[in-house]
Each structure stands twice: as structure tokens, then as C-alpha cells.
Image (tube, grey):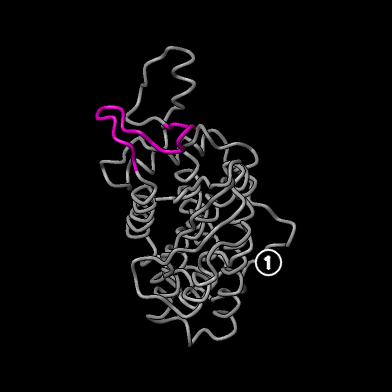
Amino acid sequence: MLKDLADQLIAGKITLAEWQMQMREFIRVTHRMAAVAACGGMQNMTPANWGYLGYLVKLQYRYLDQFAADIAANPNAWLNGRLLIRMQLYQKAEWGTFEQMLRFLKRKEGFTEERRVLGEADHCPGCLEQSSRSWQSIGTLDPIGAEQCATNCRCVFHYRRSNGSGGFIFEYGN
Amino acid sequence: MAKKLLGRPLPVVSAEYVDPAPTQLEQDQLQELWDLYAPARYKGLLKAENKSVLEETQTKPSGRFVWDDKIKRYIEVRSGRILSMREVRAAASLFSQAYANR
């Protein structure tokens, strides 16, 4: 789908706006899937969950708006093999949405602290710095995808809260 | 066919915009798409029923998975296996990859 879409834009079969509309639909579907999977299925999607997901999807649309503006400003730089590679970053961004949705749920469940745990891939300096900060108040560490490795990031968050008797209850998210 | 002009991008999304929740029809479609493109072993995952509701109503699960709200994990009905979030995350990534390459 993404390759066809890239080829169509490069070949002049669709306009930039048509390409952007189809990209928005692609983003909407893949990010909805990630969020619903994180929430425990469609039955657990509350209006608040959909609302938060709507915000996350909006963020992706805004990245896409910038990308479309870049293409319009300099078509020669983008209407080639680079186009598909950058489009694929939107496909990989669902990992970050999955993590953000879990983070939203864990905060609602009463978890108060989070820790960034490095993924299995190579680590960028930003991820290393974030993980070195150990436990922090929930929602204060950078979201997944905000560092140099962007949508290639495979870090996750772990969570904890007090058990009321001097210990912690952990949620490792794995 | 004549080559189309690139044209202008869509107007930018406003700061106030929030992508709307899907309609029931769109929710059904999402579940169908998941079953089509997610790895076969996770087919039916998004249709997971709530375990506590099933217990309260003394109803047997109708699908392949239930969601246990106490432990916040999916359970495969046939085997009783608890799915790790790691594999759910991986399944969502594989869905996205297959959907992008369809």
C-alpha cells in the first residue's frame, strides 16, 4: 500500500493532497489498532481512551503536514526513492502510540512513577540518557519516539506505585 | 493519462483538532482488518471479551481471547495462556507492517 502510494505520487497519478489524505487514513488505522491492542480490545475503549488516541493521531497528522509541506517546497528532493523510506517512518510510529496509550492507562490505574527501559535494538544517545534517569514521576520522561532514533525506537516504560507499606507494586509492561 | 500537477498540501491540522472516535461500523471494520493482517495466532484479539463480565454473567467466552482486567493481560481461552504485553506489542507492529505492504 505505502509503496503504491509513493509510486503514484512520484508518477503524477495523484496530487499531493490526495496522497496526504490516504496517508492520514493509513495513520488513523495503524494507530487505532495499536491503541486498541494496548487497551485490551475494542470492548475496553472508553470515550476517554478514544479521546486520548484522537490526540495522538492528531500529532501524527501534524508531522505529516510538515512532511507534505517539505514535499511541496522541494519536490525534486522527495519525489524519488526517499519518499517511501520517510513514509515508512509513519508505519513504525505505532510503537510509540502503543506505549503512550499504556502510559495513559497506567496513570489512570494509579501508577505514579515510570522508568524507561531500552529496547533490544541499538540505542541512541537520547534513549541512553532517558534510561539513565531511572524512576521519575509518570509522564515526565520523553515519550517513545522523541529521541534521535525517532520511530525506530523500541524502548518501553516500566511503572510502579506504592503498596502502602513501604514497598512498591510494579508493572513491567512485558 | 496526463500527469497530475503536484498541487498544494491539505490545510494543516489545527491545534484544537482531535481525531474523532470511530463509528460502530468503523470499529467492526478495524476488527476485520486486524484479523486479516495480524499474525494468524492473534486473530480475534481485538474482539476479546472482558473476563470479569463473563464471570459475573456466567457466560462462556465466544472468541479466542478474553481480557483479564485484574492483571491487565489477554488470556488465550483454549490454552489459558497469558499473553505478555511484549507479544501484543509485537503483534501490533506486525499488523502495521503487513497492512503497509498489502
Q: Is A38 in the magenta?
A: no
Q: Relative to A91, is B64 on the left or the right?
A: left
Q: Nearer the viewer, residue A169 or A90?
A: A169
Residue at 32% x, 43% y: name it: B36
What is the three-letter code of the residue carrying label 1? Pro
Q: Which residue is mark 1?
A: B11
Quarter holding the N terminus of chain A is: bottom left
Residue at x 35%, y 26% (from the top left corner): B63
Q: Up-down: is B74 above or below B9?
A: above
Residue at left offset 35%, top offset 45%: B84
Task: Write down the quadrant of residue B8 in the picture.
Answer: bottom right
Percent x, y of residue A128: 47, 75
Q: Which residues are magenta?
A: B67-83
Query: In which quarter of the view is residue B54 placed?
Result: top left
Q: Residue furthest right?
A: B16
* B39 sits to left or right of A29: left
**Residue A27 horizontal/vertical position (percent):** 50, 58
Closest to the observer: A30 or A166? A166
